[in-house]
Image (cartoon, grey):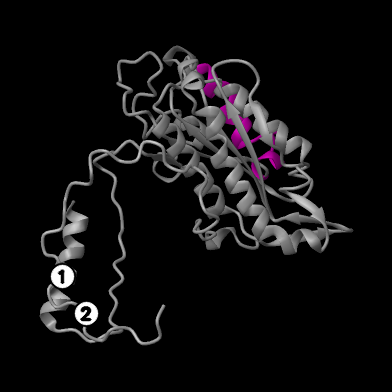
Amino acid sequence: PTTDPTADPTADPTTDPTRDPTTDPTTDPTYNPTRSPTQDTCWEAEDMLFDIVIAVDASCYMTQEECREQQWLVAETMTGIRSTFTSIVGSVEYAEQRVAYIEFGSDGSPTVVVALTDAYYNHGVAPTFGSQLSDINHDLYDLIVARADTLCTPAALAARAGNPNLSGALDAAFAQFGSGNTVADGRDSEIVIFSNCGVPENERDDLCATYEDAIRNPTGDKQGRHIGRNVVMVNNPPNSQSSSDEYSMGDSTSYLSCLVEYDDDGRIFTTDGDPNCRYNYVLLVDQSGSMTQQDFEASIDFAIEILDD
């Protein structure tokens, strides 16, 4: 920015901004994001050892826009978790937060796009890997977003049949922890599931019976309590889904809460416009230049008006 900003901004900012955006947005936007900005890493994740498997539902029909927005959401979530910290074992350098990315549809085996043992995204030769990890994280972000070019085509979306193979996704996640030696390496096991459709009602009790204890206590003994898997669910039903649909998840705020140890409030997140959701906003007001009290109050009113919209 200029080193000598205008000291006296316009005295009459627009007090009646356009409330309605254009009704005909670009129908063919560029879907390859720039490398910046992405989410800053959550401070809790820095300098912590864990493996995370991100499982993305590809079973449910949705619009192309919804599908691409979900891939962006997944990528942003990943960058909010993964830091650039590494640990070195011998001559090998590992990301402190290794990431696996899988997709699960209606049937068949889930697709493992990135494994915990991936020799580009999750480990490499020391010290080169650590010095390049920021760029590698951006590459992983780009890969997740670019998966939309496969998942979100009209033909791919039309072929979706609902009935997500969630059990297959959980088995694939457990297998990643096994092949990655997660427990032996002293890492926590984390799973983030992005769901769009629901498992049929008549199958949910069996799914809970099969996986609830396997998540909480994998070995079924006292030691197993210390190596349990932590599951977080992001429930993102398409706008066209209704509660009467065969594969509706129903109440997305409590769908399959058995998988998150019944911690609905802490581990289930929804994107369906729940009116009970509350958000915190931080307004940053530039006070570097001089302005009249009238101008300042007009700026605040404008910000409030945006929030009201």
Task: Specify whether 118 is left or right of 301.
Answer: right
| Residue type at the position of mark 2 | Pro
Q: What segment is highlighted magenta in the picture?
A: 205-226
Residue 265 within the magenta-colored segment of the rendering? no
- Give the quarter of the image for residue 145: top right
* Residue placed under numbered mark 1 in the picture: 13
- Quadrant of the image occupied by residue 116: top right
| 228 over 171 or under it: above or below | below
Position in image of residue 128 (x %, y %): 80, 61
x 26%, y 86%: residue: 7
- Please identify the quarter of the rendering in which residue 227 is found: top right
Q: Residues within 10 Å of mark 1 (few under 14, many from 20)?
A: few
The kind of secondary structure element at disc 1 is loop
* Residue 209 belongs to the span the image colors magenta: yes
* Mark 2 Cα shell of 10 Å, populated few (<14), some (14-19), many (≥20): few
Name the spot of residue 88 as percent of width and height, x first: 81, 60
The secondary structure making up most of the magenta span is: helix
Which amino acid, mark 1? Pro
The residue indicated by pointer 2 is 9
Horizontal side of residue 153 vs 273, given as left or right: right
Q: Is residue 189 above or below residue 8?
A: above
Is there a contact, CB below 8 Å, between mark 2 and mark 1? Answer: yes
